[in-house]
Image (cartoon, rainbow, N blue to C red):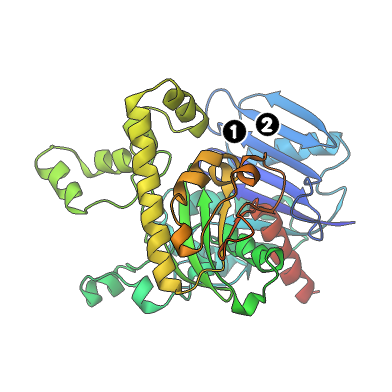
Amino acid sequence: MPYVLVINSGSSSIKFQIVDPTASASDEPFVSGLVEQIGEPSGRITVKHAGQKYVVQKEVATHAVGLEETFALLDAKGVGPTQLDIVAAGHRVVHGGMVFSQPELISDPVVEMIRTLIPLAPLHNPANIDGIEVARKLLPNIPHVAVFDTGFFRDLPPAAALYAINAEVAEKNLVRRYGFHGTSHEFVSSQVPALIDRDPLHTRQIVLHLGNGASCSAVENGHAIDTSMGLTPLAGLVMGTRSGDIDPGIIFHLYRQGGMSIDEIDNLLNRQSGVKGLSGVNDFRELRTMIDNEDENAWLAYNVYINQLRRFIGSYMIALGRVDAITFTAGVGENDKHVRADALDNMRMYGIEIDPEKNDLPNDGPRIISTDNSTTKVLVVPTNEELAIAQKAARLASQIR
């Protein structure tokens, strides 16, 4: 059976899966795993296969060591990449700038072009490149494909993509709205039309990717027309540790009056803000427990989160004109019934009505959670970015054989 190796390389971790690209969205990957704490004294390699979980605790000095150790562990189990029919490796790359809109067969010039985009994603693209370079050395005889987080939003309408700043400054510094989580938004929005029995070319929908990072998009007839994240993944919704949209003057105020450095402000807005900044926790399960225990800070954080979410939903309803579906996905969106209910509370006048019993059901694949009378269907659709990357990589690889 042909498989695709999917690699998501982060700054101190590598997530990977070996996936059958013809599988359904609900199927478990053939192999999955995680290399953690790369470059730290205590590392960990976790592999899951056929219902079994294997964990190795050892120092992982570099990404190269992490992948080499992982491949050796998989080889010992008889499911190593060189032991299987791997037709391609698909690599998640966070930022494709204005250069890459479609999956790209990786070559040395492509790697160098991704490297030029590091200023737009200084935390992500270097790690993505590390994963690409290591995997190409370990698996030199298969095609490697880059799939870009920003690709789905590459052709946003200018009114949604451009910021109202000096045009020359913006062009010189590549400042515009790029959007992120694009693979998830594209995958989920492509599942919706069949679930609500509509033509994909005549479906208008809002997709809410709600995890520790969160974003939403307005999708018209298969094409994104707006998205909440911007030049960076910091913009838009309130997130687990990120502030989302704020008055940009706050940055100047904290620099001039608060005596904070640019790096300190960056750390504040990206890692110490959002739900965590208001409540002390960023895990929604912990937040719910605190709310149930009448913690005022947790309740305030939740209300700020919901308020910002509703603002974006409302604005996208206007942008689309008609909304056929609103879909929740990712960790919070798929599992937190309270967020779903509160995000769409009191919207019956707009033809949006959640069925409480359907909403209370545990996460078990794609499903409609709105009432039969709701003219706008509300859905929960689990995202599967790895399968989406595998499908794109396999498709491109088949074209070059």
- Asked which quadrant contains residue 111, the reply is bottom right
163 to the left or right of 312: left
The residue that label 2 is drawn on is 45
Q: Is any part of residue 135 visible from this angle?
A: no
Q: Quadrant of the N terminus?
A: bottom right
Q: What percent of the width, then of the height, locates residue 401? A: 81, 74
Numbered circle sitting on residue 59: none
Q: What percent of the width, then of the height, locates residue 89? A: 71, 57
Q: What percent of the width, then of the height, locates residue 82? A: 83, 49
Relative to 268, residue 177 above or below? below
Numbered circle sitting on residue 36: 1
Q: CA distance from mark 1 to mark 2?
A: 6 Å
Q: What percent of the width, then of the height, locates residue 321? A: 44, 74
Q: Residue drawn at (32%, 72%), measured in percent from left and top?
A: 162
Q: Are marks 1 and 2 in contact (CB under 8 Å)?
A: yes
Q: Residue drawn at (41%, 44%), measured in percent from left and top?
A: 239
